[in-house]
Amino acid sequence: MELKDYLRILRRRWFTIVLLLVLTVGAAAALTLSATPQYASTARLFVSTSPADTSQAYQGNLFATQRVSSYADIVKGRQLADRVAGAMDQGFEGSDLVGKVKAVVVPETVILELTATDPNADTARDIAQTYADELSQMVAELETPEGSDTPLIKASIVDDARANYTAVSPNIPRNLGLAVVLGLLLGVGIAVVRELLDTSISSAEDIEQSTAAPVVGNIFFDAAATKKAPSVSLDQATPWAEAYRVLRTNMQFVQVDSPTKVFVLTSSLPAEGKTTTAINLAVTMAMAEQRVVLVEADLRRPLISERLGLVGAVGTTSVLVGKIGLDEALQPYEDTGLQVLTSGPIPPNPSELLQSQAMDRLLNDLRERFDVVIIDAPPLLPVTDAALIARQADGAFVVVRHGKTTKDQLAHAVERIEAVDARVLGVVINRTPQKRKGSAYGYGYGYGYGYAPDPAKLAAQEDDAVAEQIEANQAAEPGPAPTVEPAVEKAIQARAPEAPVDEEATKRPAKRGDSLAPAAAAPPAEEPDEFAWLSELREPAEETNAGLDVFSSAAPETDPLFGPSPEGDDDWRSSTAERRLAPMRGEDPGWPEFPIEESDMGVNDVDPSENGTGTTGGKGEGKRRRRRTRR
């Protein structure tokens, strides 16, 4: 394995490494915090001889250096521990003190250090001091010759033991540091072992070890997209939908010389996504204005009719046994242009039915009608149906699930297809992680960041289109401006030309008393309103609320000139409205001509139901009819 292989393992198995690191550090922290604090105290002894002259001093120093190591071993003995326990008189046993004291010889010296540890700082001091005293006495006893009162070597205490109230154990920084190192080593080691033992497919290199077929697509996993209908989710700009478009593009280069293509989509084992891939691929091709048919040849566990909401009672089986024709069995899927041939009734002998002459005639009929025929076949390893169909088609695409399908399973599936002289056209990796970096996927990089159109720009384009339409309508038919949304009004103002600048005024030299501020642009001259007289006629009707408003877009239920309107007669309303608007366009309204009598202007000739206010006064009605006479 090379360095890049180890780096790839670290990227793939980072969760295992981090998990073991956290567990190791957590265990070390728990043990450290639960441990009893230990305090230490140290006493120092100097081992020496009593020479008479210089030559004897040198030999005595060599002798003491040799002896000091022996005294360090005496500290570990049971005899000295019993003497210390008896001298302290604190209830200790000799066996309890053996493990509490440690003797260390300072290198190239005759100094002996005795260090005692105990959960109590004062007790540790007493143990170290008592050990030093008893060791000094024992050395004197051992080094005194018989018949003499003077020892040849003596151990003198040079530093007495003192109480140290700072715990020497546990050492939290040291323990946690060692735990981090141990956790990393353990995590990396287990990650490498798992990588070496893992035979699942997770990259294009893994597929190359099982088959020479190329990787034609990597389908990302998107839980939100799978919950929607294929016609909806595949029409959106998402990495998941883009992956199927890439797969559609790659499949166009398969069987280039064949005008009609018949492909089988299968997998090694169930639950690897072959049916979902077949459905989404067929819908994606149909959206590209291709004549596509999706055939469900999985006659053991059919799923297409359930997922697309189609009728599954008739389909492939019904056509093969001759119950119905192909035209009656095909079902369109929504408005995508895709034709679907569901499975139909589940037969007792699917394998014999799929390798029959009727199946061969069905495929030939589909070749003549459609550009692409996609067949959803059963898995290869449990049954042989897919291999039989692949022999009659142009070839098969094998769908593998990322991290689940093994190399051996893919190799055996390819062998099943090649055993019947069929072709493996390519491999599709399903449920590929989106945020995977540094992998060897052929088409997976880049789409995880999204490439959808900016919603703000789309909304601005729609507002500009509406503004252009409003301006075109106003230029064609002058009239009251319609109410528009603020966003559209803003778009119209942005498209309006700027106010003209008075160039003569800017060129005129400044005079005394002129303001230093720039002169405001003169407002544009208002154009005369040729329909101003209509507003004068409108005022009396608005005051009394009894006149007939010629500006109203809705006609009353009963017209004084034409009588009651038929219920729901839109032609009557439109003709009346056109006659009211005719004077505004300079046209003849075409009102009927009849004389106005004085009785028509009386006070009792108005029906309260026809009066807008419900009163019996005829003043407003008379004015309204006089306006009609004036017209």
Image (tube, helix red, strand yellow):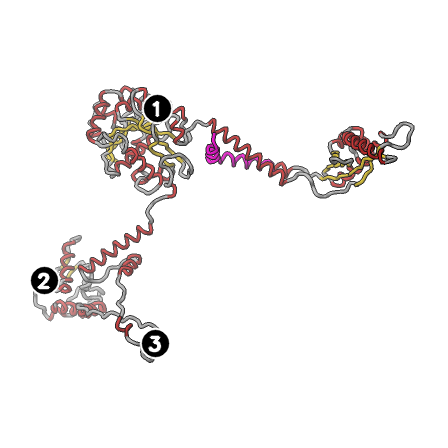
Which comes before the other along the chain, label 3 or label 2? 3
| In the image, residue 281 lies in the stretch drawn in magenta | no
Residue 590 circle label: 2
Q: Amino acid at mark 1?
A: Val
State left or right for residue 184 relative to residue 286: right
Measure how far apart labels 3 and 1 are at the Cα level.
Answer: 91 Å
Contact? badges 3 and 2 (CB < 8 Å): no
Q: Which residue is denoted by mark 3 in the rendering? A: 515
Measure how far apart labels 2 and 1 are at the Cα level.
Answer: 85 Å
State left or right for residue 333 relative to residue 623: right
Q: Amino acid at mark 3?
A: Ser
| In the image, residue 2 lies in the stretch drawn in magenta | yes
Above or below — where is 47 with respect to 298?
below
- The residue tagged with tag 1: helix, strand or loop? helix
Residue at 31% in and 57% down: 487
Contact? badges 2 and 1 (CB < 8 Å): no
Point out the stretch of residues depicted in magenta. 1-28
